[in-house]
Amino acid sequence: MKYGWIKMNRLVWASAALLGVAACSVGPNYKPPRVDAPDQFSEIGSATQPTSAPSTQVSVKPDYQSWWETLSDQELNQLIARAVRQNPDVRAATDRIRAARGERGVTASQLFPQINATGSYTHTRDSQNLPGLSALTSGSGGIQEAGLEYDLWQAGFDATWEIDVFGGTRRAVEAATDTVQAAIWDRRDVLVSLLAEVAVNYVELRGAQRELQIAQGNLQSQEQTLDLTRRRAEGGLIPYLDVAQQEAQVATTAATIPVFESEIRLSVHHLSVLLGESPGALSDELTPVEPIPVGPASIPPGVPAELLRRRPDVRRAERQLASQTAQIGVAVADFFPQFSVTGAMGTASQPLKRLFDYTSRMYEVAPGVTWDIFDAGKVYSNVKVQTALQAEALETYRKAVLQSFQDVDDSLVTFNREQVRLEALKAAVVANQRAVDLSTELFEKGSTDFLSVLDAQRSLFAAEDAMAQSEQQVTTDLVSLYKALGGGWQPGTGS
């Protein structure tokens, strides 16, 4: 039996060797597209800081890997760590990687022979009334009458191998490998978006808490002014019109409080879901009021060429382009003949005890070739389809590159200009607070009318609220800048 196996293997490998001499991979070889990246981002010059900016506002070495730690907020650090572990989108992206790797394994298996083990047992009784079966020769040399029963035992292996002479399967494996890499970059892009979204929602939560504090503080101050106004009106010192105006101001300020409370609850709900938990899961944890996180005043963004290596969405688009390029080779391979080798090796015997005797052996080897001579342009049309899809993938990549440059430039200008605006708002709050104090003092002495106090209170509330919103926006713009720079997916975030 072993000699039969040796003979069949020789035939199989001889066929493969002869066909493999001319083996090649048809279709275009992938070359990464050339990108003309600028020497620096166009908005680098927008990083001018106001002269009143604190001395701590200096450039720091960027930490793209764990950028959220620059905000110095332990609660945010814990939320992000939990989001990386529990977020459904990240888990789904991880599953897509596993699926892509499995599909690559399926494709790569086509490069090798498919071998099956076979075995069977048949119990047969011949009819005595069939013509031509009047007698059978027995294994012992005697004659058996037709119509007798007998057993047939068989065991062996069969194999099929489609030899990849023109590289269609190899191109398919290449495409599947690039798809796996694209899935990995896709998960990293999900991480970048997730971490930025967690940080932004956390900042919005703290911003809403800050605005609520400001509203509550102004409401308390306005209620005190209302009590003073009522006493002066009751004493005949001022008209009751001033009381009505102050009551309206108190009610207007009170009306803003439910809005901020709603924003706080919505932010808690969103953060909980981002962490893969029920909407109210973080209510107790995030209820205590904390300040708005503050990060560095500036970040060296590096050069655009580095950005293209760091941005996951750009890398994903480039891998998708590579995969689609390989698909052209898969399509082109259909123009050529397909070579295959099939074979079988086994034993067959009527008595079971002789199944593995040398004389029971049997085998066959059958090289074959198939070639679609006429398909009404099917293969040609498929090549055109894959080529067009490659062109589309190239444009998608170019768009991703341009979008990455725009994201960084947009984030640079908004982040730096918002810091200038914040400094101006801080000065406005100081001036408005002084105006409230002076107008209230003059009103108590009867040296000015109540309208001055009312206008000063309104201006102070508006300035303080705008300052809180600007503080929130500065940090939000900082998060957007880190996201635009492709930060957050590196080792340490579960990538």
Image (cartoon, helix red, strand yellow):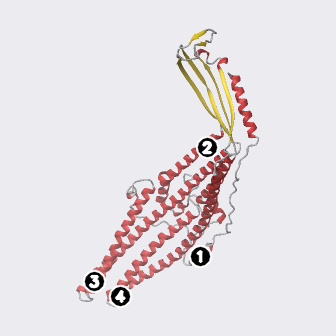
Assess disc 4: are there few (<14), some (14-19) or many (≥20) residues with their C-alpha within 10 Å of its C-alpha: some
Choose the circle earlier in sequence order: 2 or 4.
Answer: 2
- Side of 258 relative to 302 (left or right): left
The dot on residue 341 is: none
- Side of 345 relative to 95 (left or right): right
Provide residue 20's location: percent of width, then percent of height. 74, 40
In front: mark 1 or mark 2? 2
> Which picture quadrant has residue 8?
top right
Residue identifier under label 2 = 107
In space, the residues marked 1 and 4 are separated at their CA atoms by: 41 Å
Assess disc 1: are there few (<14), some (14-19) or many (≥20) residues with their C-alpha within 10 Å of its C-alpha: few
In front: mark 1 or mark 4? 1
> Which picture quadrant has residue 408?
bottom right
Q: Please determine whether, in this image, residue 479 is positioned above or below residue 366.
A: below
Outermost residue, front side: 131
Provide residue 355's location: percent of width, then percent of height. 61, 18
Report if the CB atoms under discs 1 and 4 are less than 8 Å apart.
no
Report if the CB atoms under discs 2 and 3 are less than 8 Å apart.
no
Residue identifier under label 4 = 442
Residue identifier under label 1 = 48
Report if the CB atoms under discs 1 and 3 are less than 8 Å apart.
no
Q: Please determine whether, in this image, residue 305 is positioned above or below residue 454.
A: above
